[in-house]
Image (spheres, rainbow, N blue to C red):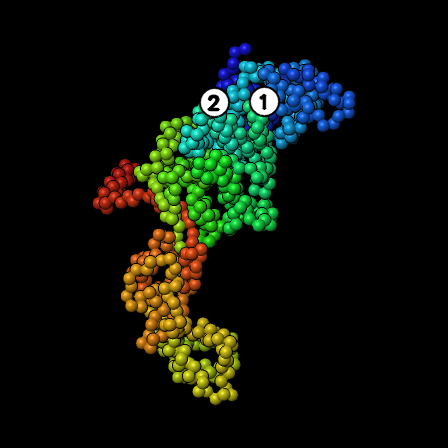
Amino acid sequence: MAPINFQQLANFIWSVADLLRGPYRPPQYERVMLPLTVLRRFDWALAPTKEAVLKRHAELSAKGIQNIDAILNNVAKDDDGNALGFHNHSQLDFYKLKGDPDNIGRHLTDYINGFSENIRKIFERFDFEKEIEKLEEANRLYQVVAQFAEIDLHPKRVDNITMGLVFEDLIRRFNEAANETAGDHFTPREVIRLMVNLLLEPDTRVLTQEGVIATICDPACGTGGMLAEAQNWIRAHNEQATVKVYGQDYNPRSYAVAASDLLIKGHRDSRIEYGNTLTNDQFPDMWFDYLLANPPFGVDWKGEKKEIDRWPDFRGYKGKLPRINDGALLFLIHMIDKFADYELGNKDLPGSRAAIVFNGSPLFTGGANSGESEIRRWIIENDWLEAIFALPEQMFYNTGIGTFVWVLSNRKEQHRKGKIQLIDARERWTPMKRSLGNKRRYLDEAAIHEITREHGALTESNTSKVFDNADFGYRRVTILRPLRLRFQITQEAKERYLDTCPELLDAVLAVEDKLGGEQYDDWNQAWEAVQKIVKALPEDVEGWAKGAKGTAQKKLFRDAFTEVDSEAKPVIAKHHKIDELDIVSLFPNQTLPELKQGELQSLLGLYADSKGIHIEYESDPTLKDFENIPLKEDIVSFVLREVWPYINDAWIDRETLDELDGGIGKVGYEINFNREFFEYKPPRPLHEIDEELEAVEKRIMTLLREVTE
């Protein structure tokens, strides 16, 4: 029998979908076509030993044996005598289904129920019984089944590789037809090819060796496209390689498609499992050579939070977790947990590589000490992040936003250790002739090759930059400025204060009598004067509280009779003796620049007076600001260069200089692509703009004259 061209076969199966027009919309065709393609392939694959299976099933049933799946799965064999790993003990096949149009619905259901449990589980996720009922009601079921009965999918004419290509092609077509939902479970094929190249190219020498065994996992596998492409890549480089793939997905139909694809290709050592990857890992205690995934963008993990919060850690990560409305980084933590241990030269500790698609959020969302920043810090400080690639916009079916591919490894090559490569591929797109949802661009083979080559070269260019790990870290330091208050007794302020403290009328009148209604630009002196005036009052009319109550009363008084004034004197908070403070100890592991006398103290908000006392001012909460200071730069030099020349009364909040893992302050990590690849373009000269505006005005006036004359 001559082999069949996979494209012709896929085209024919696609044409059968026209029978569904009416009861189904095009995006829904795959609910019928994919399950029937799977059934027809299984029907052909089981045909050589169908009679043997039926005979053995009758024997086992007569003896009352219940658990017969394992036995019959070994009876069902292909033409080469290899066990298929599944069977069907129904008396029916597609030709018999076609021969009884009046009972097609009932018989098709019975035929599916005759499969072994592993196949029935797949069809439960397809929820195919509902489609059978729907097709029967529309009087289309027999027509479709009859067409499939004529499709030749015999393994001798359509081998497993070709059948896999047919299935992948159908999946692609149906998902592209869906447009708006395709991105939920389908990654554009050229993006997958790029990811697989980036993941596997560095290991070409190892993967082309004789007897190599590679394990690949996709924890959010969707319909299995990434796993299929990774297999194809290895197979193209080494036909003798053993490739074992593992996938998991929480979408029932996607799982069913991926699991069917695996069985169609004859991968008996591989597994596709159904379940929530975040809370129900189906591959516990397993590690993999390669991992790749395209988890949902901005996935909400509120439903999983309650269970995850009960765990002592999440997949070995003990830090803060990301925001509840975006759990994409949880998938990356899960993938890192599946890394094999690595030791150079030890075959039993081979290490792993991973590639994952993200939107821009995981790059920079969250400030220092947030969950996202702590996860980035954990990854970068462990030297797992190898490279990040910025892809063009409008590449995915259900979103036009920019996307990024992260490549990670716990066995970086020596020349990559301590380094992170950023590659900007945002302009390397080709326009599509026809848009598919939000997808209007794609990467052609030349672009994929160029990006892969650039990654392998690890060189600097306009689109490729190499950084040290520490380049993406920073310390978040709080910058404070003094509170400056102007004091004045006004009628409005007096009424406001006495509404709260009516018992202090005599005290307020006494203060007003002495100080009048003048403005005082120094609250410190004004308060001393107020206290002296009140203390001089007769004790029976004083009513002036002391201690804790006095502190509260001072606040009420200040709030009522002061206003912020940038020209006023700073408000003194407290005084310190110089020998009470060890200033240098606040900057551990930092080389401080040479400073003038008292300059370091001033940077910390401590100002020496003539009596050997340090004055500390109260900070104005409305002027509070933050600076992200690169890890490679000491805090003092940064403030002297970036802060003091513009606001010389600012100081560093000492409370933010707490020691954290041997550093200073809150440490954060972010990766800002736009900043690293920004190219300044000066505006056009003004005279050019003026000339252009003048020309436009003349053209408008000419048009107006033509209308009015």
Asked which quadrant contains residue 526, the reply is bottom left
Residue drawn at x 46%, y 87% is 537
The amino acid sitting under disc 2 is Glu
Q: In terms of depth relative to the viewer, which is nearer, 298 or 86?
A: 86
Q: Quadrant of the C terminus?
A: top left
Asked which quadrant contains residue 262, the reply is top right
**Residue 73 can be seen in this image:** yes
Q: How many marks?
A: 2
Position in image of residue 53 (x %, y %): 68, 19
Disc ID at residue 37: 1
In the structure shown, which secondary structural element does the residue marked by tag 1 occupy? helix
Mark with earlier residue (2, 1)? 1
Residue drawn at x 64%, y 24% is 86
Disc ID at residue 239: 2
In the structure shown, which secondary structural element does the residue marked by tag 2 occupy? loop
Is the residue 625 above or below the residue 216 in the image?
Answer: below
649 on left or right of 153: left
589 on left or right of 233: left
